[in-house]
Image (cartoon, grey):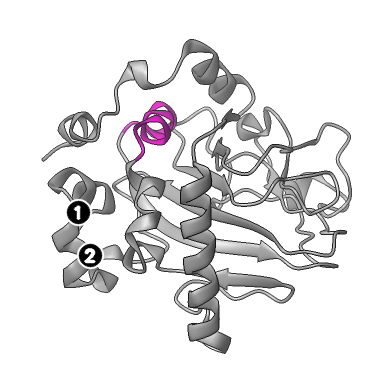
Amino acid sequence: MDMVTALAGLGATEASIDAQTRERLDRDGYAPLPGMLSAAQLTAIRTRLAELLEAEGDQAGLEVHQENGADRLADLVNKGAMFDPCFTDPRVLACVAHVLGDFKLSSLNFRAALPGHGLQPLHADYGGPVWPGPFQVCNSVWLLDDFTADNGATRVVPGSHKFTQRAREALADPAAPHPDEVRLIAPAGTVVVFNSHLWHGGTMNRSDQPRRALHSYFTRRANGQQLDQRKYVRPQTAARLSPAARFILDI
């Protein structure tokens, strides 16, 4: 199996996304994909996440990261087939391939910013700038609730994936509003793919409900994974996935 064969096997081709989406990924560093999850899919995912949060309790998210003021879950590849589109959807894979070329899933996690929490400093998901060299990481945010101006929607600084400084080096206060930031305001079911070298961060959830999202995070195949999929994969997970999907997981 190679990257071209795996993408073809999952239906991801250059035609899976339009020229405008590719242009936005190149210029702005992010692109929204509306209507990616149906109402039935949203219900199934939300139900399963609630079950997992209840079952895992204070261990929830421990495989990767726990965070004060947010509900976290990790290793979702192994926790339900309803999460499979996060690493097999052809449109998302076509976007990631456009940004990275060769890649694999690094992790599939859940984050819900709780009321009164969620503010993150602007940051990138890589150790340092790489521009003008090849990009190393790419993320996708799967909106499980409407992202609004009040409930902690992710903010991004368009074009910052080509900056040559880290946010914490360039900004006096990375947690403060940035004059060029854009909030990813969109309805539930939308997916936003973004180059993970883009400066981004969660905002404060000023609503009275958690703001829920899945994050499927990808890296170049030569890099390590945030969660070692070979170490964690369960036999029943590997058995239900196609060879192409297993290649994306690098298992």
Residue 20 seen in render: yes
Query: Is 12 situated left or right of 182 in this image?
Result: left
Tell me where residue 216 appears, x and y as whole percent: 46, 51
At mark 1, the secondary structure is loop
| Residue 61 in sight | no
Seen at 84% across and 64% down, the residue is 208
- Report the predominant secondary structure element of the magenta stretch: helix
Q: Looking at the picture, does residue 10 appear above or below residue 58? A: above
Describe the element under mark 2 as helix, strand or loop. helix
Asked whether the residues under the numbered discs 1 and 2 touch, taking CB atoms below 8 Å apart as contact, a structural biologist would say: yes
Q: Pinpoint residue 129: horizontal percent, then vertical percent.
A: 58, 41
- Check the image and report above or below for 198 versus 212: above
**Total count of labels:** 2
Task: Give the quadrant of the N terminus.
Answer: top left
Picture residue at 66% right of the left edge, 51% below the top: 145
Give the residue type that dot 2 points to. Thr
Q: Does 2 sit left or right of 116 as displayed?
A: left
Which x, y percent locates residue 230? Answer: 23, 66
Residue situated in front as seen by the camera: 243 or 29: 243
Quadrant hosting residue 131: top right
Give the farthest residue toward the bottom. 58
**The magenta stretch spans which residues?**
89-101
- Left or right: residue 93 versus residue 73 is left
Please say whether residue 92 is one of the residues in the magenta stretch.
yes
Mark 1 vs mark 2, CA separation in Å: 7 Å
Q: Does the magenta run of residues contain 14?
A: no
**Residue on which disc 1 sits:** 241
Query: What residue is shown at x 76% (from left), y 62% (from top)?
Result: 118
Residue wearing tag 2: 237
